[in-house]
Image (cartoon, rainbow, N blue to C red):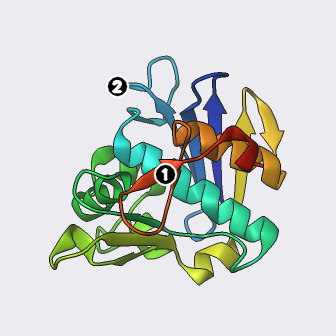
Amino acid sequence: MQRSFELHFAGDESVELVEACFLDPRSGIERRSVRGKTSGAFKNVGSFQWTAAVKALAILTLKAGLTQLEGPGAVENQLVGYKGSLAASLDYALSKQPEWLTELFGVDSSGICTVRRLILRTNPERKRPGPVVLSFSGGALENVRFEFFLNGSKIGSAEAINSLLWHLADGFKLFQDGSQVAAYPKELAA
Protein backbone atom coordinates (compact mmCIF):
# COMPACT_ATOMS: atom_id res chain seq x y z
CA MET A 1 0.00 0.00 0.00
CA GLN A 2 1.43 3.37 -1.06
CA ARG A 3 1.00 6.69 0.70
CA SER A 4 -1.39 8.90 -1.30
CA PHE A 5 -2.58 12.48 -1.23
CA GLU A 6 -5.67 13.54 -3.21
CA LEU A 7 -6.84 17.09 -3.78
CA HIS A 8 -10.36 17.79 -5.02
CA PHE A 9 -10.99 21.21 -6.56
CA ALA A 10 -14.20 22.84 -7.71
CA GLY A 11 -15.02 25.89 -9.78
CA ASP A 12 -14.70 27.29 -13.27
CA GLU A 13 -13.49 30.89 -13.23
CA SER A 14 -12.38 30.72 -9.61
CA VAL A 15 -10.98 27.33 -8.56
CA GLU A 16 -10.73 26.37 -4.90
CA LEU A 17 -9.88 23.27 -2.89
CA VAL A 18 -13.02 21.59 -1.50
CA GLU A 19 -11.70 18.24 -0.23
CA ALA A 20 -8.39 16.58 0.60
CA CYS A 21 -7.65 12.92 1.37
CA PHE A 22 -4.43 11.53 2.81
CA LEU A 23 -3.62 7.84 3.22
CA ASP A 24 -0.61 6.85 5.31
CA PRO A 25 0.05 3.11 5.02
CA ARG A 26 1.87 3.05 8.37
CA SER A 27 -1.37 3.80 10.20
CA GLY A 28 -3.67 2.35 7.54
CA ILE A 29 -6.02 5.29 8.10
CA GLU A 30 -7.40 7.41 5.29
CA ARG A 31 -7.89 10.94 6.56
CA ARG A 32 -10.38 13.20 4.83
CA SER A 33 -11.05 16.89 5.26
CA VAL A 34 -13.66 19.06 3.58
CA ARG A 35 -13.87 22.78 3.16
CA GLY A 36 -15.89 24.64 5.79
CA LYS A 37 -15.80 25.79 9.39
CA THR A 38 -17.06 22.33 10.35
CA SER A 39 -17.44 19.07 8.44
CA GLY A 40 -21.22 19.59 8.36
CA ALA A 41 -23.08 16.58 6.97
CA PHE A 42 -19.88 14.55 6.62
CA LYS A 43 -19.14 12.08 9.41
CA ASN A 44 -15.65 11.37 10.78
CA VAL A 45 -13.85 13.89 8.60
CA GLY A 46 -11.89 17.03 9.34
CA SER A 47 -12.47 20.49 7.97
CA PHE A 48 -10.45 23.42 6.69
CA GLN A 49 -11.14 26.95 5.56
CA TRP A 50 -9.79 28.38 2.28
CA THR A 51 -6.86 30.27 3.79
CA ALA A 52 -3.50 31.36 2.39
CA ALA A 53 -1.85 28.33 4.07
CA VAL A 54 -4.32 25.89 2.47
CA LYS A 55 -3.86 27.58 -0.90
CA ALA A 56 -0.08 27.31 -0.50
CA LEU A 57 -0.35 23.60 0.36
CA ALA A 58 -2.51 23.06 -2.75
CA ILE A 59 -0.02 24.91 -4.99
CA LEU A 60 2.98 23.06 -3.53
CA THR A 61 1.19 19.71 -3.93
CA LEU A 62 0.29 20.47 -7.57
CA LYS A 63 3.95 21.33 -8.22
CA ALA A 64 4.95 18.00 -6.65
CA GLY A 65 2.47 16.20 -8.90
CA LEU A 66 3.99 17.93 -11.93
CA THR A 67 7.45 16.88 -10.78
CA GLN A 68 6.27 13.26 -10.67
CA LEU A 69 4.86 13.57 -14.19
CA GLU A 70 7.70 15.46 -15.84
CA GLY A 71 10.68 14.35 -13.77
CA PRO A 72 12.99 16.12 -11.31
CA GLY A 73 14.34 19.40 -12.57
CA ALA A 74 11.58 19.89 -15.14
CA VAL A 75 9.39 21.75 -12.65
CA GLU A 76 10.27 24.15 -9.86
CA ASN A 77 9.15 22.07 -6.89
CA GLN A 78 9.39 24.93 -4.41
CA LEU A 79 7.31 27.65 -2.88
CA VAL A 80 9.36 30.68 -1.84
CA GLY A 81 8.23 33.80 -0.04
CA TYR A 82 8.75 36.57 2.43
CA LYS A 83 6.47 37.91 5.18
CA GLY A 84 2.82 37.81 4.15
CA SER A 85 3.37 35.39 1.25
CA LEU A 86 1.66 32.07 0.63
CA ALA A 87 4.93 30.30 1.51
CA ALA A 88 5.18 32.16 4.83
CA SER A 89 1.55 31.25 5.64
CA LEU A 90 2.16 27.54 5.08
CA ASP A 91 5.44 27.71 6.99
CA TYR A 92 3.60 29.25 9.96
CA ALA A 93 0.96 26.50 9.81
CA LEU A 94 3.65 23.81 9.73
CA SER A 95 5.22 25.34 12.84
CA LYS A 96 1.99 25.77 14.80
CA GLN A 97 0.28 22.55 13.62
CA PRO A 98 -3.30 23.88 13.59
CA GLU A 99 -6.21 21.48 13.90
CA TRP A 100 -6.96 21.39 10.15
CA LEU A 101 -3.42 20.18 9.43
CA THR A 102 -3.41 17.46 12.10
CA GLU A 103 -6.92 16.31 11.12
CA LEU A 104 -5.77 15.84 7.53
CA PHE A 105 -2.32 14.32 8.07
CA GLY A 106 -2.40 12.89 11.59
CA VAL A 107 0.44 12.97 14.10
CA ASP A 108 3.18 10.55 15.08
CA SER A 109 3.78 9.17 18.58
CA SER A 110 5.73 12.36 19.45
CA GLY A 111 2.83 14.61 18.47
CA ILE A 112 4.53 15.85 15.29
CA CYS A 113 2.22 16.31 12.32
CA THR A 114 3.04 13.79 9.56
CA VAL A 115 3.20 16.48 6.88
CA ARG A 116 6.26 17.99 8.60
CA ARG A 117 8.14 14.84 7.56
CA LEU A 118 7.02 15.28 3.95
CA ILE A 119 7.72 18.98 3.42
CA LEU A 120 11.23 20.37 3.76
CA ARG A 121 11.72 23.94 4.98
CA THR A 122 14.65 26.31 4.62
CA ASN A 123 14.65 29.26 7.01
CA PRO A 124 11.58 28.01 8.93
CA GLU A 125 9.67 30.75 10.74
CA ARG A 126 12.01 33.20 8.95
CA LYS A 127 14.34 33.32 11.95
CA ARG A 128 17.04 34.88 9.78
CA PRO A 129 16.76 37.44 6.96
CA GLY A 130 15.54 36.15 3.65
CA PRO A 131 12.68 34.07 2.39
CA VAL A 132 11.27 30.77 3.59
CA VAL A 133 11.58 27.97 1.03
CA LEU A 134 9.26 24.95 1.07
CA SER A 135 9.37 21.79 -1.02
CA PHE A 136 8.23 18.20 -0.80
CA SER A 137 11.15 15.95 0.13
CA GLY A 138 12.66 13.61 -2.45
CA GLY A 139 11.29 10.69 -0.44
CA ALA A 140 7.80 12.15 -0.58
CA LEU A 141 8.08 12.62 -4.34
CA GLU A 142 9.09 8.98 -4.71
CA ASN A 143 6.71 7.45 -2.17
CA VAL A 144 3.52 9.51 -2.34
CA ARG A 145 0.95 9.12 -5.12
CA PHE A 146 -0.46 12.59 -5.82
CA GLU A 147 -3.90 12.68 -7.46
CA PHE A 148 -5.99 15.67 -8.50
CA PHE A 149 -9.67 16.10 -9.32
CA LEU A 150 -11.54 19.06 -10.76
CA ASN A 151 -15.34 19.19 -10.53
CA GLY A 152 -15.39 15.43 -9.86
CA SER A 153 -13.17 14.39 -12.79
CA LYS A 154 -9.63 13.12 -12.36
CA ILE A 155 -6.96 15.20 -14.04
CA GLY A 156 -3.49 13.88 -14.69
CA SER A 157 -1.98 15.73 -17.63
CA ALA A 158 0.71 18.34 -17.13
CA GLU A 159 -1.40 20.81 -19.12
CA ALA A 160 -4.42 20.38 -16.82
CA ILE A 161 -2.30 20.64 -13.67
CA ASN A 162 -0.60 23.77 -15.01
CA SER A 163 -4.01 25.25 -15.72
CA LEU A 164 -5.06 24.57 -12.12
CA LEU A 165 -1.87 26.23 -10.89
CA TRP A 166 -2.63 29.25 -13.06
CA HIS A 167 -6.14 29.55 -11.61
CA LEU A 168 -4.92 29.16 -8.03
CA ALA A 169 -2.25 31.81 -8.57
CA ASP A 170 -4.99 34.20 -9.78
CA GLY A 171 -3.34 34.67 -13.15
CA PHE A 172 0.12 35.12 -11.75
CA LYS A 173 3.10 32.82 -11.71
CA LEU A 174 4.82 32.37 -8.38
CA PHE A 175 8.53 32.68 -9.03
CA GLN A 176 11.35 31.25 -6.96
CA ASP A 177 12.90 34.68 -6.34
CA GLY A 178 10.79 35.49 -3.33
CA SER A 179 7.27 36.72 -2.95
CA GLN A 180 7.52 38.82 -6.11
CA VAL A 181 5.07 37.74 -8.76
CA ALA A 182 5.10 38.35 -12.48
CA ALA A 183 2.28 38.29 -14.98
CA TYR A 184 1.55 34.75 -16.12
CA PRO A 185 -0.46 34.87 -19.33
CA LYS A 186 -2.95 32.05 -19.80
CA GLU A 187 -1.20 30.81 -22.96
CA LEU A 188 1.94 30.09 -20.89
CA ALA A 189 0.02 27.90 -18.44
CA ALA A 190 0.13 24.84 -20.70
Out of 189 and 182, give the one closest to the viewer.
182
Q: Which residue is mark 2?
A: 37
Task: Tell me if residue 146 comes above or below residue 46 in the rendering.
Answer: below
Q: Earlier in the sequence, mark 2 or mark 1?
A: 2
Mark 2 and mark 1: span between their CA atoms?
Answer: 33 Å
Out of 13 and 147, give the one closest to the viewer.
13
Q: Amino acid at mark 1?
A: Ala
Which mark, by number, is residue 182? 1
Task: Tell me if residue 110 comes above or below residue 36 in the rendering.
Answer: below
Task: Tell me if residue 99 comes above or below residue 79 in the rendering.
Answer: above
Residue drawn at (22%, 57%), measured in percent from left and top?
83
Q: Left or right: 137 with respect to 116? A: right
Where does residue 65 sit, x and y in percent of width and height? Answer: 69, 61
Task: Tell me if residue 120 comes above or below residue 38 in the rendering.
Answer: below
Q: Left or right: 125 with respect to 76? A: left
Q: Left or right: 72 with respect to 33? A: right
Residue drawn at (25%, 64%), measured in percent from left and top?
95
Q: Amino acid at mark 2?
A: Lys
Q: Residues within 10 Å of mark 1 (few under 14, many from 20)?
A: few
Where does residue 5 sit, x and y in percent of width and height? Answer: 63, 55
Out of 104 and 130, give the one closest to the viewer.
130
Secondary structure type for disc 2 = loop
